Image: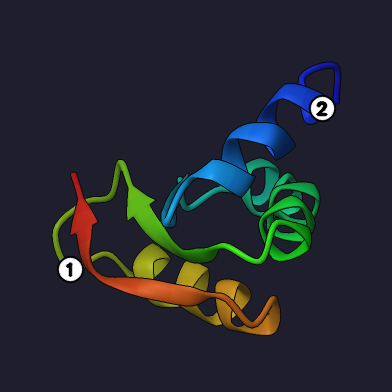
Amino acid sequence: PHTATDTSQVAKLTNFVLIPCQPSPLDIAALPPTIELVRAARCNAAAVITRTAYRSLDIKDTELALQTYGIKIAPITIR
């Protein structure tokens, strides 16, 4: 929140924003302000799921949660 002004200015200058998201309730709950900021800047964006175990069920759960926000999901995960 304290960097929202600076972040929104940067978002307006970029072509694409990649939003990292861990498969945790806290990370998922923190997404709406970021997604709103990206949408307000009319910037293309996608979320990438990070810190996952190989073939973890957490990946699917996180993808489902991200879909509710209507954001694209990167076709890869970062372990």
Q: Secondary structure at mark 1?
A: loop
Mark 2 packing: few (<14 Cα in 10 Å), some, or many (20+)? Answer: few
Q: Which residue is mark 1?
A: 55
Which picture quadrant has residue 8?
A: top right
Tag 1: amino acid? Arg
44 lies above or below 19: below
* Between discs 1 and 2, the one toward the N terminus: 2
Distance of label 1 from label 2 (alpha carbons):
38 Å
Where residue 3 sits: x, y (%)? 77, 19
Name which residue lies at 69% across and 76% down.
Answer: 69
Name which residue lies at 80% across and 49% down.
Answer: 33
Q: Quadrant of the C terminus?
A: top left
- In this rendering, would 12 be left or right of 15? right
- In this rendering, would 28 be left or right of 49? right
Pick whichever, 30 or 15, lies toward us.
15
Q: Mark number for residue 9?
A: none
Where residue 57 sits: x, y (%)? 35, 71
Where residue 59 sits: x, y (%)? 36, 67
Pick whichever, 66 or 59, lies toward us.
66
Q: Which residue is mark 2?
A: 5
Mark 1 packing: few (<14 Cα in 10 Å), some, or many (20+)? Answer: few
Q: Secondary structure at mark 2?
A: helix
Pick whichever, 10 or 24, lies toward us.
10
Tag 2: amino acid? Thr
Question: Outermost residue, left direction?
Answer: 54
- State yes or no: discs 1 and 2 in contact (Cβ < 8 Å): no
Which picture quadrant has residue 41?
A: bottom right
42 lies above or below 52: below
Which picture quadrant has residue 4?
A: top right
